[in-house]
């Protein structure tokens, strides 16, 4: 694994470590171990074995002929929904749990919004014989009840968080409090490219398998790279993993799609890159939804996995350097795309992923005939109750 290591833990002005002193030795230990494992063939063999035989990698790239006919682009999808547990989150969860084993830490904690990271972490812990506790906002527990049941079935303890907005931000707060208290015997498996250094680097590297596979498949099957790569962005792990392989290819346009909620103009959204400014949250400097006094603003999205007021610091750097374009789509647009992809292609995507497809479905998104690849980050089983309620099924 060739690691792109951010100098001093920063991506331009973003990133860093804004954490209690108690956590610094644990973060130092984690970074050193990760860099050692990244150069160690034994770790690679164990990780690759699990990704192949347990997770089901490599995942395919699927051409989407009906969407191509509708849009005028050559649309395809990188199928992370076909991973074991139904989303990309398992790539990182397996990797970090292997690191925890090597540190001799048998207790794992995690936060989750849509529940996919929680399910992935609970799954990895069950496979590797680790104790698992997952923090999840009470609101998200209600709208993602299926994933709560899945986590408990896998042996994890699910802790509903009742403070604040009762969503992902508050689950992260509680998980960090737990880690500060129990840092000696506990590893915190952060699910996105957010948080203090080295987590943005580590999560990106474990998710970079998505982009490597997508790039190789494009060259093998099409003889060319995509013209446009598209992914939804909440904290940003699926997008960062997908984009990573194409960052040096200037001819590949990269587009990250945030949750526009009820509309950016309403303030009821979760789009910090579209309508935020730099600030510190959960241990890192990044774009953040905050008011004039610097207080974190409440977010809204139909998608629990995108309902977060900040974003991974590398995304902030990519925005400022104009390497990646970031835009937003509304709840209504995402729900429309959710329905369109299901009816036209027979694939029920996660509401998170539906945001990426919604952008692609907008008139004039790309030049006619362009090859557009969407990172299909997860399947939509978990969203059936929400979709049924909102769509009247």
Image (cartoon, rainbow, N blue to C red):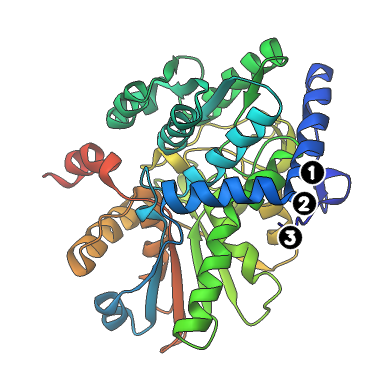
Give the residue number, with chain letter if any, for mark 3. Answer: 320
- CA separation in Å, label 3 and label 1: 31 Å
Rendering coords of residue 19 (x, y %) = 78, 25
Q: Are marks 1 and 2 in contact (CB under 8 Å)?
A: yes
Nearest to the observer: residue 30 or residue 340: 30
Give the residue number, with chain letter if any, for mark 2. Answer: 39
Tell me if residue 40 comes above or below residue 166 in the rendering: below
Counting residues from the N terminus, which is met first, the one under dot 3 or under dot 2? 2
Tell me if residue 249 comes above or below residue 102 in the rendering: below
Counting residues from the N terminus, which is met first, the one under dot 3 or under dot 1? 1
Rendering coords of residue 77 (x, y %) = 39, 68
Label 1: which secondary element: helix
Tell me if residue 210 comes above or below residue 145 in the rendering: below
- CA separation in Å, label 1 and label 2: 5 Å
Pointer 2: residues within 10 angstroms few (<14), some, or many (20+)? Answer: few
| Eye-nearest disc, 3 or 2 | 2
Quadrant of the image occupied by residue 28: top right
Q: Which mark is residue 36?
A: 1
Pointer 1: residues within 10 angstroms few (<14), some, or many (20+)? Answer: few
Pointer 3: residues within 10 angstroms few (<14), some, or many (20+)? Answer: some
Rendering coords of residue 227 (x, y %) = 53, 81
């Amino acid at each position: 694994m060739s690691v792109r290591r951010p100098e001093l833990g920063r991506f331009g002005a973003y990133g860093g470590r804004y954490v209690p002193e108690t956590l610094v030795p644990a973060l130092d230990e984690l970074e050193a171990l990760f860099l050692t494992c990244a150069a160690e063939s034994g770790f690679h063999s164990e990780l690759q074995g699990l990704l192949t035989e347990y997770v089901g990698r490599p995942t395919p790239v699927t051409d989407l002929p009906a969407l191509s006919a509708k849009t005028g682009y050559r649309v395809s999808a990188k199928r992370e929904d076909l991973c074991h547990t139904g989303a990309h989150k398992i790539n990182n969860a397996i990797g970090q749990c292997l690191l925890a084993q090597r540190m001799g830490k048998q207790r794992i904690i995690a936060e989750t919004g849509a529940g996919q990271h929680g399910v992935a972490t609970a799954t990895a812990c069950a496979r590797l014989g680790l104790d698992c506790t997952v923090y999840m906002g009470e609101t998200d527990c209600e709208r993602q009840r299926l994933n709560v049941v899945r986590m408990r079935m896998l042996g994890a303890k699910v802790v509903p968080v009742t403070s604040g907005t009762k969503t992902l931000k508050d689950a992260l707060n509680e998980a960090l409090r737990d880690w500060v208290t129990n840092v000696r015997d506990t590893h915190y498996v952060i699910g996105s490219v957010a948080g203090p250094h080295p987590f943005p680097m580590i999560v990106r590297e474990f998710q970079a398998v998505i982009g490597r596979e997508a790039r190789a498949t494009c060259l093998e099957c099409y003889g060319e790279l995509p013209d446009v790569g598209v992914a939804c962005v909440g904290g940003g792990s699926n997008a960062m993993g997908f984009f990573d392989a194409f960052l040096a290819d200037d001819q590949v346009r990269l587009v990250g799609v945030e949750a526009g909620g009820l509309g950016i103009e309403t303030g009821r959204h979760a789009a910090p890159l579209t309508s935020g400014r730099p600030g510190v949250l959960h241990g890192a400097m990044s774009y953040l939804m905050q008011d004039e006094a610097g207080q974190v603003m409440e977010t809204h999205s139909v998608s629990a996995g995108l309902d977060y007021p900040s974003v991974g610091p590398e995304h902030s750097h990519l925005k400022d350097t104009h390497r990646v374009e970031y835009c937003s789509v509304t709840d209504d647009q995402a729900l429309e795309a959710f329905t369109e992809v299901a009816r036209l292609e027979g694939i029920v995507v996660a509401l998170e992923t539906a945001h990426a497809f919604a952008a692609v479905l907008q008139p004039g998104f790309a030049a006619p005939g362009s090859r557009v690849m969407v990172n299909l980050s997860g399947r939509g089983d978990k969203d059936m109750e929400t979709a049924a309620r909102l769509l009247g099924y």
